[in-house]
């Protein structure tokens, strides 16, 4: 068996891929055509990232730390792949169904959410990596938007692209989460 197959199985990639596929099919079947619905798009991206974030750690973190392989490039690739798949799955649903959000928003939001998931894996462990993106998503959708730059930073997911503070927040979360996860790995 090849290392990539073993890595994918140890990171629960088949189950995560099935969850992403099921969410995509549900959105395609249930969302009616109409004007773009950014809240639904962000919920779908959040579900995709949450489903895939459980794979940010293996079965035995201590055993992995003793492995004689370079984890840094694998961890970076894993985080970026989760973001790419989450965004691509939503864009595929939009291509055959209704448009939920512009492409720029999908790319930015999937990047920021996966950065939060990676940061969650570092702070809380892989089993609870979903809590940071899900918590921030819930706050962004349920708490009233404060005015000014603070509102753009706190609710970066629901602002259009081109909003400087929202864009910088998402890309900073991606960079911070990816670097922290690549260097430290998931918490035990």
Image (cartoon, grey):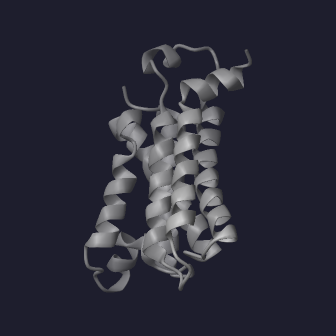
Quarter of the picture containing the N terminus is top right
Residue 172 shows in this picture: no
Residue projecting furthest to the front: 29
Quarter of the picture containing the C terminus is top left
Residue projecting furthest to the left: 143
Say above or below: 1 vs 164. above
Comparing 46 with 177, the one in front is: 46
Comparing 53 with 172, the one in front is: 53
Residue 8: x and y, percent? 62, 29
Residue 71: x and y, percent? 60, 28
Residue 32: x and y, percent? 52, 76
Residue 156: x and y, percent? 43, 72
Residue at the (70%, 20%) spot, across then down? 3
Comparing 54 with 185, the one in front is: 54
Residue at the (34%, 48%) spot, across then down? 131
Residue at the (31%, 86%) spot, across then down? 147
Decide if residue 40 is on the left or right side of residue 145: right
Decide if residue 62 is on the left or right side of residue 83: left
Number of marks: 0
Residue 24: quarter of image: bottom right
Say above or below: 68 vs 74. above
Residue projecting furthest to the right: 2
Residue at the (68%, 24%) spot, across then down? 5
Residue 41 shows in this picture: yes
């Amino acid at each position: 068996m090849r290392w990539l197959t073993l890595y994918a199985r140890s990171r629960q990639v088949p189950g995560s891929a099935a969850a992403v596929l099921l969410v995509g099919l549900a959105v395609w079947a249930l969302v009616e055509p109409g004007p773009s619905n950014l809240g639904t798009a962000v919920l779908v991206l959040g579900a995709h990232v949450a489903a895939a974030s459980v794979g940010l750690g293996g079965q035995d973190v201590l055993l992995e730390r003793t492995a004689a392989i370079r984890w840094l490039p694998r961890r970076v690739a894993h985080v970026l792949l989760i973001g790419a798949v989450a965004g691509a799955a939503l864009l595929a649903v939009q291509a055959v169904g209704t448009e939920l959000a512009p492409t720029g928003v999908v790319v930015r939001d999937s990047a920021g959410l996966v950065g939060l998931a990676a940061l969650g894996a570092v702070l809380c462990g892989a089993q609870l990596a979903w809590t940071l993106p899900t918590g921030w998503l819930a706050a962004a959708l349920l708490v009233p938007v404060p005015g000014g730059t603070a509102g753009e930073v706190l609710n970066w997911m629901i602002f259009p692209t081109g909003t400087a503070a929202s864009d910088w927040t998402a890309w900073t979360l991606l960079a911070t989460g990816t670097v922290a996860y690549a260097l430290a790995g998931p918490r035990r």
